[in-house]
Image (tube, rainbow, N blue to C red):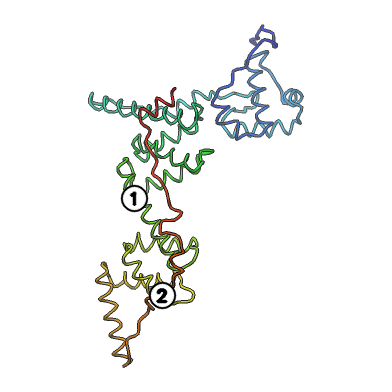
Amino acid sequence: MRIKDSRSIMFSDTPVPDLFIQDMMPKLSGNAVKCYLFLNSVFHNGSRDATRADVADRLGISEAAVDESLLELQSMQLITVGDLDIAISDLKMHELLKRYRPVSSSLPGDIVERENLHEGRETMVNQINMTFFQGMMTFTWYDHIDRWFEGYGFDAEVMYALFQEAANHNRLDGPGYVIRIAEDWAAAGVKTYDQLSVYYSQFLEKNKLKALVGKRLRRHLSEYDLEDIDRWIDEYGYGKEIIEEALSKTRGASTPSVRFVSAILKDWHEQALKTIDDVRDYENKRQADITRTRGKSPYRRDNRDNFTQEEDLLPDDDAGFDTRMPRIITENDQDEINS
């Protein structure tokens, strides 16, 4: 027995989940979207029977295009194509099953703590939705936020700062940029807002050192140059004072290079030199050894005091690195958003 709908097609409606409109539709081809809407319409209205020829005729496309659209919809888990029928997936139930996690019995204190944690997260998610998406945040973002909370252990304030960082760079058009930032923060061990503050301080200090190197060497730094500088800081553990000492060895050179400075710093690192005094003692001893070997005046691998006044015309050390830490919204700010 086939169930029929007695309502006129003129006055009937076809419900389409917002999950499809916001998350699925932008990823589908035009024919696949038309095919999905038509299948939903047939399911909710009429005899619920439709052949490929019917679909092709109603949509004005070929049967081959219908087959391609059905395969595309099936690959997105929107439908299941069988030998005799087509089943339309329940997107809401599918989303619920993805989010559902069975919880074993817990102590009352654990339950209260977990509820308070989720309440704070839910409040922050709603705040992100209203602040950065005007209440229209797609379900894809909710999935990513859940994973970042669970996988990276971010506090609610860190999650808000993550979206503020992306908004500052106008990069909320898709999750790619935010995913990279979240991965960087997680790799640096950031979980709390205090840890994020330390991370930003170190990040800005590193950028200032990179600007200083570019200024002293009078060159634009390449990607490989930046990788070398990261090694000086992260692997060798050298700060501004020792890096400045190495940069001073390039004075007077016509084409100073990062590679030359890297060779000096690598030598100091291999000699286990940690402080500026260690470095200077090592250099003085090395020059004395060269003098004894050659029997002439000490050779110095630098030409100090040969900079001209042109250096004063170069940018400041922190030029172009005015990165601000994302600001956490206050209650007054939220009142202004809600008004």
**Mark carried by residue 301:** none
Horizontal placement of 11 versus 339: left or right?
right
Q: Nearer the viewer, residue 209 or 270?
A: 209
Label 1: state its secondary structure. helix
**Mark carried by residue 251:** 2
Between disc 2 and disc 1, the foreground one is: 2
Q: Quadrant where the N terminus lies?
A: top right
122 versus 15 height, above or below: below
- Which residue position is annotated with label 1? 201
Label 2: state its secondary structure. loop
The residue located at (31%, 44%) in the rendering is 195
Name the amino acid, label 1: Ser
The answer to which quarter of the image holds residue 158 is top left
The residue located at (26%, 24%) in the rendering is 112
The answer to which quarter of the image holds residue 109 is top left
Q: Position of residue 22 (x, y in %)?
A: 56, 29
